[in-house]
Each structure stands twice: as C-alpha cells, then as structure tokens.
Image (cartoon, rainbow, N blue to C red):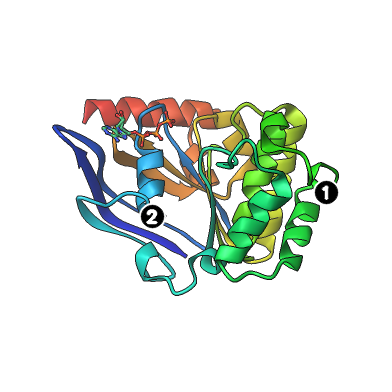
C-alpha cells in the first residue's frame, strides 16, 4: 500500500506539491492524473526517495523509501523510460541492477520474458525504439518481484499496441494483488485502465475516488477532469 499524507514540496517561492493526501491500495490500479506541471513526478520522486519532502510523508507499506530493508523487492518503479546507459546491452543493464541488489541472475531472463524482450536482450539500449525502452524500464522495475509498482507516464510516446500491452500488464499486476500507481495526463487511457483515480493540479489533490465516483454526473472522464480543474481554479 502507498500512503501519501499531507505531502508538500516547495521550490523557492512555488509549491510543486501542496498538502497532498491519498492512498493506493493492493489489488487495484490507481491513476494519478493531472496536467503538465501538476506535481505528479515530484510526488513520485519523493515516494521513491529521489527527492526530499518539505513536509508530510510518503510511505510504502508504512515505511519511507529510505527505511525499506530491501527496496527493489518492495517497490518497482519506472520513471523517465529505461534510464539505462545507451551503450550498454539490455541484458547487461538488468544484470547490473540485479547484482547490485543481490537478485539472482536467473531473474533477469524471467523479466526479459515477461516484457517480451528476449530476442533483443543483446542489443545495445541506444538502438531500442521508445516502446522497447519502456519495456526495459518495466523489466528493471520487476526484477525484485515487488508488491508495489509505480509507473510515471509509462505510455508516453507509445503506439496503440504498446499502450494496450502496458494496460494489460497493469491489470495483471492488480489481479495478482499488487498495488499499482500510474501517472498520466492522458484521460482516455486512464478511463480504460484504472480502478481508482487521483486528480491533481497545481500541487493540490482535486478529486480522489473510484473511477465511477469521479466520473459520476459527467458524460466522460474528460468532462469530469475539466470540471475538477475549473472548480480547483475557482477555489
Ligand atoms: N527541480 C525543480 N526545481 C524547481 N522547480 C521544479 C523542479 N522540479 C519540478 N519543478 C516544478 O514543480 C512543478 C511540478 O512539476 P512536476 O514535474 O512534478 O509535474 P508533473 O505533474 O509531473 O508534470 P508533467 O506531466 O509535465 O511531467 C512544476 O511547476 C515544475 O516546474
């Protein structure tokens, strides 16, 4: 379970994240939806120990990232695509992460299979298409077989087949009882993918509920989203 409580992050005069509170629970896909600059990545970076909070907490299973005994086996994350050295071969990228986290080498072959990259395993990352790089990023996130999966805009730049693949994968994770938190600014994709939804704008949570609750009373998620943004701006 992911718990964000009264989380704030100030950059000089502006609040990138402003008193954000929500949870993402096991067995469900939680969408984190907001326009550019809303504070999604900042929240996720704090959750993953890559940035510090000004105040409040972000925990995974009740612990801050820095307090996790075995982080990669607890939470798998993909931020900014593969995040691999371009000259490295895909398999070596994964082996390096596995080795530095005491994960058996055999798991590298397993995750390459899970993301359907076996045939590209010896290819250098710089030759990868965007979709392949996203798959490699997901493979790295899955190395520790974590119960919590965090994906920051995983479908950015993907073709419809890639989007469908990621959607199916997230659904599988949830069915397996994992907690899935996925950020996006694409509404159609969220409407097809998530169980629960958090809408954020200008660092503040505007709506948090099940997809049905958020859309209720609106013709579509897109309408609900813009209504939430307008109501937030008027506050
Ligand atoms: N290192 C930084 N220094 C100063 N301001 C920052 C920094 N990182 C983010 N910000 C600001 O914080 C706000 C939130 O940014 P963030 O990247 O979290 O948004 P986002 O919702 O992930 O947007 P996007 O969909 O464009 O990725 C923005 O106004 C951004 O300019």
Q: Residue, x 67% and y 30% (percent of image)?
A: 130
Is 144 left, or right, of 118 in this rendering? left
The reply to whether discs 2 and 1 touch (Cβ–Cβ < 8 Å) is no
Q: Where is residue 198 drawn, in percent x and y?
A: 43, 44
Numbered disc 1: secondary structure: helix
Q: Residue, x 36% and y 65% (percent of image)?
A: 66
**Visible residue check, residue 216:** no
Where ligand 1 lies, by quadrant?
top left
Q: Quadrant of the C terminus?
A: top left
**Visible residue check, residue 76:** yes
Tell which of 219 and 186 is nearer to you: 186
Tell which of 157 and 26 is nearer to you: 157
The residue wearing badge 2 is 47
Q: Where is residue 112 drawn, in percent x and y?
A: 76, 53
Q: Residue, x 55% and y 41% (percent of image)?
A: 83
The residue wearing badge 1 is 118
């Amino acid at each position: 379970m992911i718990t964000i409580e009264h989380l704030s992050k100030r950059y000089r005069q502006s609040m990138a994240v402003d008193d954000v509170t929500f949870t993402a629970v096991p067995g469900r896909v939680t969408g984190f939806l907001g326009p550019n600059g809303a504070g999604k990545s900042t929240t996720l970076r704090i959750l993953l120990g890559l940035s510090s909070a000004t105040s409040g907490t972000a925990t995974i299973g009740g612990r801050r990232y820095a307090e996790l005994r075995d982080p990669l086996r607890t939470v798998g994350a993909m931020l900014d695509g593969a995040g691999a050295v371009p000259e490295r071969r895909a398999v070596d990228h994964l082996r390096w992460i596995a080795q530095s986290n005491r994960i058996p080498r055999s798991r590298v072959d397993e995750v390459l299979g899970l993301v359907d990259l076996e045939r590209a395993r010896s290819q250098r990352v710089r030759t990868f298409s965007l979709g392949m790089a996203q798959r490699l990023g997901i493979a790295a996130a899955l190395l520790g077989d974590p119960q919590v999966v965090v994906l920051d805009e995983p479908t950015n730049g993907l073709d419809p087949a890639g989007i469908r693949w990621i959607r199916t994968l997230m659904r599988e994770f949830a069915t397996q009882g994992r907690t899935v938190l996925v950020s996006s600014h694409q509404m159609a994709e969220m409407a097809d993918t998530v169980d629960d939804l958090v809408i954020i704008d200008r660092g503040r949570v505007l709506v948090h509920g099940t997809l049905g609750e958020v859309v209720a009373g609106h013709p579509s998620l897109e309408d609900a989203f813009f209504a939430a943004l307008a109501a937030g701006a008027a506050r």
